[in-house]
Amino acid sequence: MKGVLLVNLGSPNSTSVKDVKKYLGEFLMDKRVIDLPYISRFLLVKGIILNTRPKKSAEAYKKIWWKEGSPLIVLSERLLKKVQQETDLPVELAMRYGNPSIKNGIEKLANQGITEILLIPLYPQFAMATTETIVVLANKIVEKHFSHIKLTHLPAFYNNESYIKVLSNSIKKELDILQPEHLLFSYHGVPERHIKKSDITKSHCKIDNSCCNTPSEAHKFCYRHQCYETTKLVAKQLNLKENTFSTSFQSRLGRDPWLQPYTDQTIDKFAKNGIKNLAVVTPAFVSDCLETLEEIGIEAKHSFIQNGGKHFATIPCLNDNNQWAKTLSKWINNWNSKN
Ligand SMILES: C=CC1=C(C)c2cc3[nH]c(cc4nc(cc5[nH]c(cc1n2)c(C)c5CCC(=O)O)C(CCC(=O)O)=C4C)c(C)c3C=C
Ligand SMILES: [Fe+2]
Ligand SMILES: [Fe+2]
């Protein structure tokens, strides 16, 4: 019997500093997120970051938290309900960090007699810190506790035709109302080092103006290429004119170089250069979360207005969009009928 596990990133259990610290500890001690040797990672995370960040993050979470809980989790649950309505296979939801855990999700499926699981990391673009860490952990759990279960996973869907259509339609609906001068595609950043580590050719990714446009096997695992492709395909679908849209990377942490251009600097530059009406879409996230609602919806908006901008809009993520739920169900049903 077959079943499906949707996996998103996760959130703290509450906005208390204690819960945020616990969550950040699990998240940042993941060697695919902070990719330092164990001792250095331990000293950086436990000795430095966890002494200051949880208080600041807890304040940020308080600004966006809902009555029902973390937006990321509530929205993922709403999506799960809609997906379940469109498929006969049992579908469960898990988070890579925090609750409900991946082990808990697999256990729920196993208890229903499931012996084959389709794992769906809810990330359009591949990264070590997203798709890879979910697949590696889920496989470890299956090997250790559920060795009778066969696990397969859905690869990153950054250029999938149905995904691009659904994303484009959801953006178009907003653009028709907002009529912005410029549309910024802001993706979560990763350290440049992560891109080089994921380069299976070991020599392709230069992180320059051309590598991500030059066909290569490396692109199967290149987050930067996949982000630019999503932008390109959506822009094509929406007939966006050159210079009316661009791509940037947000949420950097620490002093190492992360993917550029940085979203905060890009938005300030737009405002200073006279752009008055800006819309921002965040396609690395399928659910609205701290990074879209607070970092973009509150912080970036404030900065844009302070620097002379007038209208700033954040386009919602796909969340529990009906067409998105139908697309996921279609992928699930295709997997079910093919295997
Ligand atoms: C595309 C998705 C994501 C990538 C890639 C990613 C990488 C990454 N993130 C950090 C550090 C933090 N991220 C934080 C929050 C956060 N990150 C993502 C997604 C990706 N992260 C989401 C969806 C969220 C929000 C979760 C929520 O509960 O709403 C945070 C915590 C909050 C904060 O203090 O800002 C940190 C820290 C690193 C180091 C990293 C490296 C590749
Ligand atoms: Fe590249
Ligand atoms: Fe992050």
Image (cartoon, grey):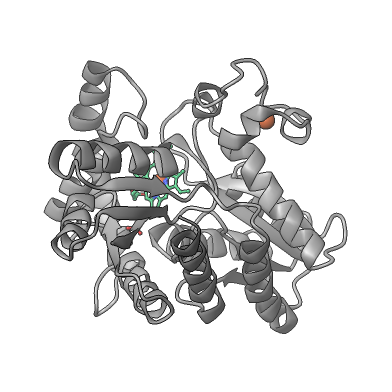
Q: Quadrant location of the C terminus?
A: bottom left
Q: Quadrant of ligand 2?
A: top right
For the point 24% across and 80% down, which residue is it?
67
| Picture quadrant where residue 59 is located | bottom left
- Residue 203 percent location from the top left of the image: 64, 15
Q: Which sits in the foreground, 60 or 187?
A: 187
For the point 34% across and 70% down, which residue is it?
89
- Residue 287 percent location from the top left of the image: 44, 65
Residue 163 appears in the picture as rendered:
yes
Q: Which sits in the foreground, 33 or 296?
A: 33
Vertical order, 124 against 209 (above or below): below
For the point 43% across and 79% down, which residue is it?
86
Q: In this view, does 201 lie to the left or right of 254?
A: right
For the point 52% across and 75% down, which residue is it?
326
Residue 318 appears in the picture as rendered:
no
| Picture quadrant where residue 10 is located | bottom left
Q: In this view, does 127 lie to the left or right of 113?
A: right
Vertical order, 276 against 144 (above or below): below
Q: Is residue 146 left or right of residue 193?
A: left
- Residue 210 percent location from the top left of the image: 78, 29
